[in-house]
Amino acid sequence: MKTLNRLRLSLFGFALLTTDATVGESATHSWNVVEAGSVGDGKADCTPVFQKVLDEVGKAGGGVVDVPAGRYRINSHLSIPANVTLQGIYRVPPTSGALPADSLTGSVLLAYAGRGSEEGPPFIRLAGNNAAIAGLIVAYPEWKQADVPPVAYPPCIYSENTDNVGVRDCCLLNPYEGIKLVRAARHLVRNVTGYPIKRGIFVDECYDIGHIENIHFWPFGVAYQPENPYCKWINTQGVAFELARTDWHYIHNTFCFGYGIGYKFSKSKQGSANGNFLGLGADSCQRAVVVEQAQPPGLLFCNGEFVGRWSSTNAVCLEIAPGAEGKVSLVNCSFWGPIERCVWMRSRVGQFTASACNFVDWDNANSGSPAIQLDAGKAIIQGCTFNRSKLAVTVESNVISAILTGNQAQGGFRVNNHAGSRTQAELNEKER
């Protein structure tokens, strides 16, 4: 028994030594901006200290730079080296509430550089592979809601020619442009809140799958009124999400409120997008989704919720432009609110499909607009519900093929057909 007790004591002592050694080793590889000399009073310029620590960690091969609670004034710009994370206190997507920049709590970076121009260095550059920021609020103290048009700044967060960069658990409070990623393969943007002004997230030339998840762009820090000049500017000019050339992109569980365009699919010099879009939400948008161009594999939308711009009479939830080539597919999406037309298919060469979708509101000006306007191209509408006793679909003469099957509508499924036999309508609820 004595031998067994000695063995137990020896093992316990060894465990303590091992634990102490581990803690000590970890402590020598931690970095902290306050311990390095930064003052989180919102007055002293912390740029030199922040950048010095970031560079030291980069030279050490990587690590985490901790940003304790405080308001840190950054007069210039920050560059995050490869394998380095700038980490604030938040482990959830933070909110600013209604607090002004000088009253924000938590880990807050105050951005001052670049006011008056979109050109110039970004506030934060993810400069190397695996660079990341997390757990921070970024605020612009010189921002004023009275400035209309809003004052421009360079992007808040930018990365180019990198792999596997990340933005996580951050609030971007009223930046002119939130996040811009160019040739940033396999980026991960997750758990981000805020109210970017001109554009929230932009992606181009992403040739290996990027992920954007759990984003909530909403009027944080803004006294919101639909007809307020600042709010109306964003609600007619701003874009929440824009994808240009990006292959196999994944966007999941995202929401935006009060933008001119919620989700924009554009074409850059390098091309357009294809991808998987699940759980999208666009509320009070003049255009919830605009497809200017898409790759042949197409854009796959599932479980979308789309609402027209408050107080408008000409909002369209999904507009497919005349030159769009790739297929646009909607499954289990819902449309409601102040909408003129839910879908406007304009492409002569494209294809559009809506399956198991719910069209609650449209024609809010009572001008006779249909829920779905098919001007050209090919379309399949199947298994959908139309919850107004109004015109469901208009098929214009330039449509190549329209197949409308298994749809139900209040008062019966009504179609205005100008394409003759190129429209096939079968097994729909009969008009009453």
Image (cartoon, grey):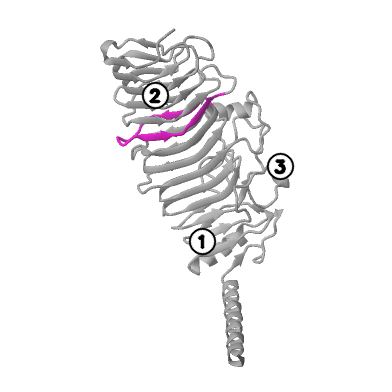
State the image coordinates of residue 301 (x, y, percent, origin top left).
Answer: 41, 34
Circles 3 and 2: CB atoms closer than 8 Å: no
| Picture layout, residue 129 above or below residue 154 | below
Q: Which label sits on residue 383?
A: 2
Q: Place residue 17 in its image quadrant.
A: bottom right
Looking at this rendering, what residue extends furthest in the bottom direction? 2
**Label 3 to label 2, Cα distance in Å?**
49 Å
**Label 1 to label 2, Cα distance in Å?**
50 Å
Inspect the image, locate mark 1, and give the three-letter code of the amino acid beneath it: Val
Mark 2 closeness class: few <14, some 14–19, many ≥20 residues within 10 Å = some
> Residues in magenta?
285-309
Q: Circle 1 sits on which residue?
A: 84
Mark 3 closeness class: few <14, some 14–19, many ≥20 residues within 10 Å = few
Viewer-proximal residue among 119 and 52: 52
Q: Place residue 343 in its image quadrant.
A: top left
Q: Is residue 291 in sight in this rendering?
A: yes
Q: Residue at x 63, y 56 (%)?
A: 89
Q: Residue at x 41, y 54 (%)?
A: 162
Viewer-proximal residue among 192 and 234: 192
Q: Place residue 294 in its image quadrant.
A: top left
Mark 1 closeness class: few <14, some 14–19, many ≥20 residues within 10 Å = many
State the image coordinates of residue 415 (x, y, percent, origin top left).
Answer: 38, 12
Viewer-proximal residue among 421 and 27: 421
Label 1: element kind: strand
State the image coordinates of residue 230 (x, y, percent, origin top left).
Answer: 62, 29
Q: Circle 3 sits on which residue?
A: 100
State the image coordinates of residue 102 (x, y, percent, origin top left).
Answer: 72, 46
Q: Earlier in the sequence, mark 3 or mark 2?
A: 3
Q: Which label sits on residue 223?
A: none
Viewer-proximal residue among 400 and 295: 400
- The reply to whether the magenta stretch includes residue 294 is yes
